[in-house]
Each structure stands twice: as structure tokens, then as C-alpha cells.
Image: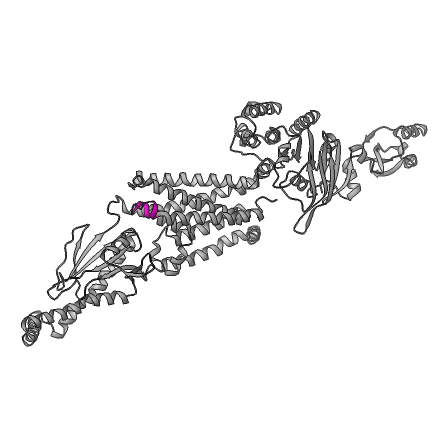
């Protein structure tokens, strides 16, 4: 037993001496737990999902719906945009559709002029959506319907009473309403005061879904809401689920393989190959460029293979917009390779590169949207997600595969990825010059 | 051919090279002898432009050696201490990769490859993965990889570490032939036998300083004694031990005496004196002094300490 304890003591001693192992064991998991908690912690709240909103109706009901949606914790109503001259312009039914189609926000509500008139028996609404993110889309629709249905019964009750009064005259209308309450009370054995309460709790909808048929249920408020749904983007996509997720997973694997490839610099140093290379007519810059080009080409091949694999296995439509997809693949590989070189330039050993690489890749994947939609994360995390390569690549891949975006539309993604690649490369190069990879 | 002028190099607080100056002539087989950590590999790293010296100048064939300078590198071949090869590739593939960095035309590279593979006995196994090679074979391949571009100077940093005696001798023979053909060789080692066998001139380095420089014979002249004579004890030798004392320092080693002959004493006169004194010597061993002794004499420690 004493021998075993001595051996255990020895292992502790070695472990405590290895700072990298120490940080991998304690610090990195703590950082990741905190990070994932922040990312997924937002899932229950769904705070401030962006929802485009146009109210063309002058009715009181429409105004009530707008006020209710405006004050809800879930939605941030976007009613205007800045035009080319920098002027704030209210969305109309056309511009809001364009905004959804271009990916500015993934859903919009339009209350048309005839949303609710004096002769209306139901509230008419148009719902435009882009289910590029299934989870977000379902949450928006669910919360939207719940919010509207909670607020309309009171409006409708008042509206019905007004209607009867206007149709029958004020006194007769009041009598009619009173008699109606008594009749319901008599036959349904409830207090008249409860009737309004029960009415207020009722929910119903009449949905005209342009993508699928819908059979509405029957209750007191059936037919009160006439919600016309229009899926503006992605109807042509054969496998929505796979198309939405392929970019995120491909990026995570790309980062892992390129971070691994960058470790070859350490391996060459360790084996003595680096010193042999540098004794030949080869400069340090040439070695770095060769590594960069090699890793980048591997990244391009890997992404192409992954997307074609997705095409064969999940029928993802890769070919119809392949030129733009390929440009994004190149830009993503450039940025990810720069990340790998950055790792190698900042660390001193292969083990350190491995540890730091894992931390950064998991962080970027979580924050950048590989696993979970960025739009559903807390606002702080959403802010930081824009500093990750993953975010710009995934958004770009979605633009190409989901919306069929053209070259001009993907320019922001290409530009950002290339910009990240250039900046990170310059930092890495400076670091390589001062670092120890080319030293004893 | 090679000049180091007042070269200094430190790693944080450790002074790796302390004002090192050397001049190595064309065609020499020059040895840099010293214990581990003496500064041999640092000198090599500076000579090949891998490390920059903190101060001082280095020239090879008139070209100044700098980390970002490439011209002088075509003139040198470097054999690293470690086996700097891609294990998963064959000997031929390794040679092609490293040879191509010198811009050799394909036929010239092929010819050099075949010639050197033959010379070190690896031609028949040139297509095998290096991982399957023995230590000695890897060392030989490691050596010829530095020769494909026909350098004027070959810098060998302890190229026989961990090699069996047979392979070591084969490497020595090969290096001696290269030197005989006119190649300048700089060879670092902590084995004095290697330096004594191979080198025309040797610099002894310790703690980053050159403490002795010259041909092996010149260096041995720095010792206060010359040959060591071991004489087995018997009645005659014990009773005449005073005769020995006048020729040098006597050390009593239990069953035998060790006489460290004074530099001015001659072996012939010592044995003549024994004969005159009728000392019947039964077993005598004569040993030449070594560079190891010189190192011990200069530094108070052994080469392999």
C-alpha cells in the first residue's frame, strides 16, 4: 500500500508541475461551463426575438395587438429601416417581405388595412417567415399566437357588444346582451359574471397556411383569427433540417482539423526537421506560407467533401448555387487556416496548442451558432458571436444554401471572413517572428 | 573558409557562447569537442543561420551568415543531432523532398541520390519506409540527406549519437573519404576518440568558451606529462620504484604502478635505466595521453560529466 501511495504521490507531483494539464483539467472546463451556461441559458427566455411589423389598419383591435406585441418581453418589433439616404422609413407590406427574404429578420407580421373592420367577424393578419432556423421559427409562431390570443378575447367581446348595440340600437342591444348572458347562464349552469371570464380564457385560431392544410378546432373563438402564413424562403429546399445544420457542423470539424494541422510545425521542430529545413535555402516566411497554403487547400477539400457528402446522404442542394458556395468555402478555409496558424504562433508546445485550440474551437462553435441558433442567445453572446469565424461562415452558408443568395448578397460574409483571415495572419506572422517555434 | 569573430549568444541568463572566435580552413576536418551543454550545438545553429548571434560576425566562404540570408546555405550541408527525417516516407521520398529545396534539376538529384544511397549501403532499401530502418541506417540516411546538393562545407552535429560501433565506423570511413575528396567538415562531439580519429584540428569548448585549439598532437603537448606506463608490481619493481620517480609522476594502483612520463623524458631512456638496474619487468602497458586527459587537466572535469 505504501508503494502505491508513493506512486500516487509521484503522479500528483508530475501533474502539478504540468501547467498545461492543470489548466486543461480545471480552468478550461470551468470556462466552458460558464460559456455554455450563458449560451444555452438564453434558451428559456427567448428575449427579444426580432419580428418585423407593419400595421396598415386603423382599427382599435389592430392597435391593441400592436401595443401588446410591443410590450411583450419576447419580441423586438422592427417597424422601420434606414434607406440609402440614411432616412428612417416605415416598412410596408412589400419592403417587409424583402427584409424577411434577405435574412434581416426571420419573421414579420402585417396587419392589413382590413385587419378588422366594423363588419369583420375575425382578425386578419399576414405572417411572413423564413424558417432558416426551425427552432426560432417555431418559437416565434408559438409565442406570437399565444400573445395575440391572450389579448383578443376582451377586444372581441367588447366589439361584439358594440356590434349588437349598433345593429339593434343602444337600448335593445343592451337588453340583447343581458338576455344572452342569462340564457347562457341558464342552460350552461354558470354565473353570468363567469361568462366573460371564460370567454377571456378561450383560444382559437383560423389559420390559412400557404404551405400546408390546417383543420381548426371548434370553440367560442373559432374563426376570430384569420392568420395567413407565407413561407418566403426555403420552400424549395429538399431537406431543410440538414441544409440548416450542415454549415455549422462542417465548420466545427474544419476548425478541429486545421488546428491539428498547424501542430505539424511543432512536430517538425521536435523531430529536428525544422532545423534541417532552415539550414537549406528556405526562409521562415516560406515555411509559414507553405503551411498556410497546405492547410488552406486541405480545408477547402474537406469542406467540399463534407458538402458533397451532405448532398449524397441528405439530398442537400449543393450544386444549384455551387459557385457562391465555393467562394464561401475558400473564404472560410482562409479564415480557419489563419486561426490554426494563430494557435501555433501563440503557443510553445503541441500540447498547449491542443488545449488552447480545443477551448477556442468549442467556444467559437457554441457562440458562433454551430450547435444553437445565435438569434436565440442572450444579446451579449449575440454581440460576441460576430467576432467568430464560425458565425460568418454559417450565416454565409445559410445564405447560399437556404436563400440561394447571389455573389453580391454574400459579399459581406466573404469580406468579413477574408478580413478576419488577413488580420489574424498578420498577428500570427508578427508573433512567429518573435516566438519560439523557430528558436531552440 | 569559415570564420567566427567574437560571437556571443545567451539564452535568458545562460551564456551559451562567450566571445567565440574560430577560423576553419578549406579541406579541414575540424572538431568541436566538449561535454553536453558546452555550446557545440549553439555554435552549429548559429553557423547554419538557424539562430542569430547576440553579437559578433560569422562568415562562410566569404558570405555573412544571417538568419534571413539564403546564399551561404547553398554552400553548406547540415547533419542535425536528431534524425531529421519523415519516418512515414521512404528514403527516396525523403531525399527527393530535401534535395528539391536546393533547386537541383531532376536528373542531377536522381544521380546524387543513387550515388549516395549506394555509398552508404541503402540503395536496395531505398523504397522502404524510414520507420522500418535500424538506428544505424537512419543515421546514414540522415547524413547523406545533407550531401545531395554537393556542399562545400559539411556541418555535423554529433551525427553518431546512439549508433552501434559497426555503423559508427562505417560513418567515419564515409566521412573520411568525403574529406579526402576535398569536403570541409566541421564535426561536434563529446567523444574524444571520435575527435582524435577524425579531426585534423580540434577546438575544445566548455561553458561557451574555446579553451584549447590546435591539432590533436599540439593539444596533447599542452599536458604536463606524455605517455602513461603501467608496470605490474613484483619484488624487483617494488624495490626499484625510486628509479621510476626520476622519470615522472608515480601512482600506486594496488597491483601495478602507473608512471606518467615527464614530457622531457624519453621512453627509450626509461627502459634503458630499468635494464641498467636489472629490474625484471614482466608486464608493461604503454598508453598515449588523450584529449580526455587534456580536458580533465584544463577544466577539472571529465568530458562526459
Q: Is residue A389 left or right of residue A136?
A: right
| A400, B9: nearer the viewer | A400
A104 above or below A276? below
The image quarter in which residue A208 lies:
bottom left
Asked which colour scheme the image uses, the reply is one colour
The image quarter in which residue A145 lies:
bottom left
A256 above or below B255? below
- In this orientation, does residue B49 appear? yes
- In this orientation, does residue A200 appear? no
Q: Residue A313's spot in the image, x, y percent?
A: 30, 39
B126 above or below B41? above
Quadrant in the picture for the C terminus of chain A = top right
| A165, B226: nearer the viewer | A165
Q: Residue at x 91, y 29 (%)?
A: B269
Which residue is outermost to the bottom? A171
| A231, A363: nearer the viewer | A231
Which residue is outermost to the right? B276
Total marks placed: 0
Q: Residue B193's spot in the image, x, y percent?
A: 73, 33
Q: Is residue B256 left or right of residue A196?
A: right
Q: Residue B196's spot in the image, x, y percent?
A: 75, 32
Q: Is residue A419 left or right of residue B270?
A: left
Instruction: Answer whether residue A136 is magenta in the image.
Output: no
Q: Is residue B15 left or right of residue A402?
A: right
Q: Residue B21's spot in the image, x, y percent?
A: 74, 41
Instruction: Answer whether residue A405 is magenta in the image.
Output: yes
**What's drawn in magenta, residue-wise?**
A398-409
Amino acid at each position: 500500500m505504501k508503494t502505491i501511495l508513493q506512486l500516487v504521490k509521484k503522479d500528483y507531483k508530475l501533474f502539478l508541475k504540468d501547467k498545461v494539464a492543470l489548466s486543461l483539467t480545471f480552468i478550461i472546463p470551468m470556462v466552458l461551463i460558464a460559456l455554455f451556461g450563458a449560451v444555452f441559458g438564453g434558451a428559456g427566455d427567448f428575449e427579444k426575438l426580432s419580428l418585423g411589423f407593419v400595421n396598415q389598419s386603423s382599427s382599435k383591435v389592430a392597435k391593441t395587438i400592436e401595443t401588446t406585441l410591443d410590450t411583450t418581453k419576447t419580441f423586438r418589433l422592427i417597424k422601420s429601416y434606414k434607406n440609402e439616404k440614411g432616412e428612417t422609413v416605415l416598412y410596408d407590406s412589400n419592403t417587409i417581405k424583402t427584409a424577411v427574404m434577405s435574412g434581416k429578420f426571420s419573421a414579420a407580421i402585417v396587419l392589413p388595412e382590413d385587419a378588422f373592420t366594423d363588419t369583420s367577424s375575425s382578425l386578419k393578419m399576414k405572417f411572413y417567415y423564413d424558417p432558416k432556423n426551425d427552432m426560432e421559427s417555431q418559437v416565434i409562431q408559438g409565442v406570437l399566437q399565444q400573445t395575440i390570443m391572450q389579448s383578443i378575447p376582451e377586444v372581441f367581446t367588447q366589439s361584439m357588444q358594440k356590434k349588437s348595440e349598433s345593429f339593434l340600437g343602444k337600448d335593445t342591444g343592451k337588453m340583447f346582451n343581458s338576455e344572452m348572458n342569462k340564457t347562457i347562464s341558464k342552460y350552461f349552469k354558470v354565473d353570468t359574471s363567469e361568462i366573460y371570464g371564460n370567454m377571456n380564457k378561450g383560444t382559437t385560431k383560423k389559420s390559412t397556411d400557404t404551405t400546408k392544410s390546417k383543420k381548426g378546432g371548434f370553440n367560442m373563438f373559432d374563426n376570430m383569427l384569420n392568420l395567413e402564413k407565407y413561407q418566403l424562403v426555403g420552400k424549395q429546399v429538399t431537406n431543410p433540417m440538414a441544409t440548416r445544420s450542415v454549415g455549422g457542423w462542417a465548420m466545427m470539424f474544419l476548425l478541429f482539423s486545421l488546428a491539428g494541422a498547424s501542430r505539424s510545425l511543432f512536430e517538425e521542430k521536435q523531430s529536428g526537421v525544422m532545423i534541417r529545413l532552415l539550414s537549406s535555402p528556405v526562409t521562415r516566411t516560406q515555411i509559414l506560407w507553405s503551411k498556410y497554403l497546405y492547410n488552406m487547400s486541405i480545408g477547402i477539400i474537406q469542406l467540399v467533401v463534407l458538402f458533397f457528402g451532405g448532398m449524397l446522404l441528405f439530398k442537400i442542394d449543393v450544386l444549384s448555387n455551387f459557385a457562391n458556395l465555393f467562394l464561401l468555402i475558400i473564404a472560410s478555409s482562409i479564415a480557419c487556416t489563419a486561426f490554426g496558424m494563430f494557435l501555433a504562433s501563440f503557443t510553445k508546445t503541441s500540447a498547449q496548442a491542443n488545449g488552447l485550440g480545443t477551448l477556442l474551437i468549442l467556444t467559437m462553435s457554441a457562440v458562433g451558432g454551430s450547435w444553437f441558433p445565435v438569434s436565440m442567445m442572450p444579446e451579449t453572446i449575440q454581440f460576441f458571436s460576430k467576432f467568430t469565424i464560425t458565425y460568418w461562415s454559417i450565416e454565409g452558408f445559410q445564405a447560399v444554401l437556404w436563400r440561394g443568395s447571389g455573389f453580391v448578397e454574400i459579399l459581406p460574409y466573404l469580406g468579413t471572413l477574408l478580413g478576419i483571415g488577413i488580420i489574424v495572419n498578420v498577428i500570427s506572422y508578427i508573433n512567429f517572428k518573435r516566438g519560439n517555434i523557430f528558436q531552440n | 573558409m569559415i570564420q567566427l569573430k567574437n560571437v556571443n549568444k545567451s539564452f535568458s541568463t545562460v551564456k551559451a557562447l562567450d566571445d567565440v572566435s574560430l577560423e576553419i580552413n578549406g579541406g579541414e576536418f575540424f572538431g568541436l569537442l566538449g561535454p553536453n551543454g558546452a555550446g557545440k550545438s549553439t555554435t552549429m545553429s548559429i553557423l547554419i543561420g538557424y539562430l542569430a548571434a547576440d553579437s559578433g560576425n560569422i562568415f562562410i566562404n566569404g558570405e555573412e551568415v544571417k538568419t534571413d540570408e539564403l546564399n551561404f546555405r547553398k554552400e553548406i550541408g547540415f547533419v542535425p543531432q536528431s534524425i531529421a527525417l519523415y519516418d512515414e516516407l521512404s528514403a527516396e521520398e525523403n531525399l527527393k523532398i530535401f534535395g528539391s529545396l536546393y533547386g537541383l534539376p531532376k536528373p542531377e538529384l536522381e544521380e546524387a541520390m543513387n550515388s549516395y544511397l549506394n555509398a552508404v549501403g541503402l540503395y536496395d532499401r531505398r523504397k522502404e519506409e524510414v520507420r522500418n530502418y535500424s538506428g544505424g541506417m537512419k543515421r546514414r540516411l540522415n547524413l547523406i540527406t545533407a550531401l545531395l546538393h554537393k556542399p562545400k562545407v559539411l556541418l555535423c552535429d554529433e551525427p553518431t549519437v546512439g549508433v552501434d560501433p559497426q555503423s559508427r565506423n562505417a560513418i567515419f570511413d564515409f566521412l573520411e573519404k568525403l574529406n579526402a575528396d576535398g569536403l570541409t567538415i566541421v564535426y561536434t562531439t563529446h567523444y574524444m576518440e571520435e575527435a582524435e580519429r577524425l579531426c585534423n584540428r580540434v577546438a575544445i569548448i566548455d561553458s561557451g568558451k574555446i579553451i584549447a585549439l590546435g591539432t590533436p598532437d599540439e593539444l596533447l603537448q599542452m599536458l604536463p606529462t606524455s605517455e602513461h606506463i603501467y608496470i605490474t608490481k613484483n619484488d624487483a619493481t617494488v624495490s626499484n620504484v625510486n628509479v621510476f620517480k626520476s622519470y615522472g609522476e608515480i601512482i600506486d594502483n594496488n597491483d601495478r604502478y602507473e608512471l606518467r612520463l615527464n614530457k622531457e623524458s624519453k621512453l627509450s631512456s626509461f627502459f634503458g635505466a630499468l635494464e641498467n638496474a636489472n629490474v625484471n619487468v614482466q608486464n608493461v602497458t604503454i598508453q598515449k595521453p588523450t584529449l580526455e586527459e587534456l580536458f580533465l587537466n584544463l577544466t577539472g572535469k571529465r568530458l562526459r560529466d
